[in-house]
Image (cartoon, rainbow, N blue to C red):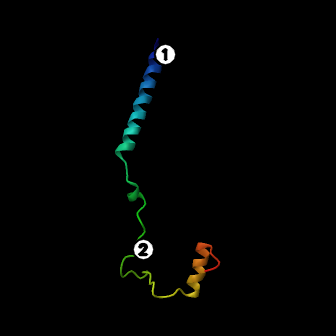
Amino acid sequence: MRGTAVTTAVRALKAIYGSLVAAGCMWVCIPLDDLHPEPSGPPPHHPERLRPDLPLTEAERALERQLTGDPAR
């Protein structure tokens, strides 16, 4: 009789635990847009601000080739 009561209590606690985990997952729902924001680049007047009007130097092109793995660039 005692074993049955313990087994029932363990099952009940596991069910309660699972319910609390599920409720917590729903309560702490974070939208995907907040997890992975779109990269916008450096802010205005930042020293590393990109200049589309200037062509890349030879060193920059070599680094770009290394990073992209594109030998044609």
Query: Could you tell me if the residues under marks 1 and 2 are in contact, i.e. CB atoms within 8 Å?
Result: no
Position above or below: 8 against 50: above
Query: Which residue bears the numbered disc 1?
Result: 3
- Identity, as a three-letter code, of the amino acid under mark 1: Gly
Q: From this viewpoint, which residue is outermost toward the front?
A: 72
Q: From this viewpoint, which residue is outermost toward the right?
A: 71
Residue 21 shown left or right of residue 66 in the figure: left
Position above or below: 72 against 25: below
Question: First in sequence: mark 1 or mark 2?
Answer: 1
- Is disc 2 surrounded by few (<14), some (14 to 19) or many (20+) residues within 10 Å? few
Residue 38 shown left or right of residue 72 in the figure: left
Tell me the residue at 39%/80% (across/down): 46
Tell me the residue at 41%/66% (across/down): 38
> Percent x, y for residue 40?
40, 71
In the rendered image, the quadrant that contains the C terminus is bottom right
Tell me the residue at 40%/63% (across/down): 37
- Determine which of the numbered discs, if any, sits on residue 41 in the image: 2
> Percent x, y for residue 60?
56, 83
> Percent x, y for residue 8?
44, 20
Residue 71 shown left or right of residue 3 in the figure: right
Tell me where residue 53 sits by quadrant: bottom left
- Identity, as a three-letter code, of the amino acid under mark 2: Gly
Instruction: Work out whether residue 48 or residue 41 is closer to the camera in this orientation and state it.
Output: 41
> Percent x, y for residue 66?
61, 75
